[in-house]
Amino acid sequence: MSTFSRVVVLGTGGTIAGRAASAGDNIGYTAAEVGVAQLLAGVDAPAGVTLAAEQVSQVDSKDMSFDIWRRLADRCAAWLAEPDVAGVVITHGTDTLEETAYFLQSVLAPDKPVVLTCAMRPATALAPDGPQNLRDAIVVAATAGARGVVAVCAGTVHAAADVQKVHTYRLDAFDSGDAGPLGYVEEGEVRRLREWPAVDASARQRFETMLAAPAWPRVEILVSHADARGTIVDALLLARRQGEVEAVEGLVLAATGNGTLHRSLEEAALRAQADGVAVLRATRCMQGRILPRPNEKLRDAGALTPVKARIALMLELLKSPA
Ligand code: SIN
């Protein structure tokens, strides 16, 4: 752990900041009520680390928005640029944590750590998991040599690219799939199993474009399933041809297995692609990646889940102001 460093904790809401009427209630609470400074008050800083808190938003993460993402990325970049700041922690709801983590890694890919953490039980619970998760996240953020955007939950460190919420109720609700966790936090120390996420110089360009863009492109996710139809794609295309404001610019198709699509959906997606809509296939399987096959007419998103493929496509389609 580095000595005499600052860790900045940015609050965005979530169950970690949730409040219920009774301590025995772990599900009937209101998310995003307790301020981040109050959350920090219950956590002791590791030796040599000073803590600072900033409230960036206060939302249930199901309501996460591009505006909050933009503000969050901006605040992360500003704090990480301070020489005495070792890293940033973000308290976040579990429901879209993996999306925010992937977005931040895409636009920051920082050489210092940005650590998202959360809780499955509200702050008012009999045995809340938030304080330990927050303490573990601070430990990761203060660890010498740590870098990149990661998530910390239930003593496990996950890389932004791999992390997925996989359980609706258990405290250990996240998984890194085939990649496996990046490491563990044990009694205030990180036991790392693999490399920190790579620093990516091209993230700076995405960051600048994202901050300057007048609007985010509309990218929809559609699922391929038994008896799927192309009618929603065709309705989106019709609206686009009629000049609808915020017309669809991209489609992510949550494909079966190794990236296959129901033939009706595939035919409609090809019509959309011919009309200038960017189309990406992402597997709806929980694990694995799409292994490319020759002569595919629609691009695939590799190992990205549909929600992460959507973020990748939106960032690709973001336009600089004219
Ligand atoms: C949320 O995502 O904000 C609510 C659920 C949670 O944090 O577990």
Image (tube, grey):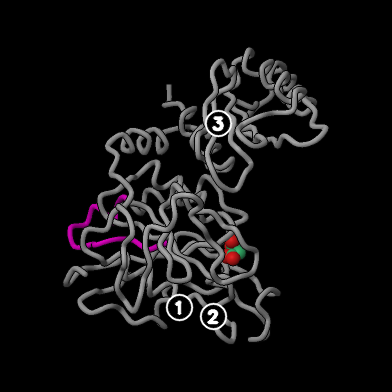
Q: Which amino acid type is shown beneath numbered disc 2?
A: Pro
Front-lying residue, 204 or 224: 224
Front-lying residue, 50 or 198: 198
* Label 3: how many Cα within 10 Å (few below 14, some 14–19, many 20+): some
Residue 206 horizontal/vertical position (percent): 37, 35
User: What residue does disc 3 label?
Assistant: 217
Q: CA distance from mark 1 to mark 2?
A: 7 Å
**Magenta stretch contains residue 231:** no
Give the magenta range.
77-90
* Label 1: how many Cα within 10 Å (few below 14, some 14–19, many 20+): many
Farthest-out residue, right: 227
Q: Which amino acid type is shown beneath numbered disc 3?
A: Pro
Residue 60 visible (yes or no): no
Residue 50 horizontal/vertical position (percent): 25, 74
Lower sequence index among marks 1 and 3:
1
Disc ID at residue 218: none
Residue 176, above or below 228: below
Residue in view at x 45 percent, y 26 percent: 319
Question: Cβ–Cβ below 8 Å for labels 1 and 2?
Answer: yes
Residue 52 horizontal/vertical position (percent): 32, 70
Q: Secondary structure at mark 1?
A: helix
User: What residue does disc 2 label?
Assistant: 128
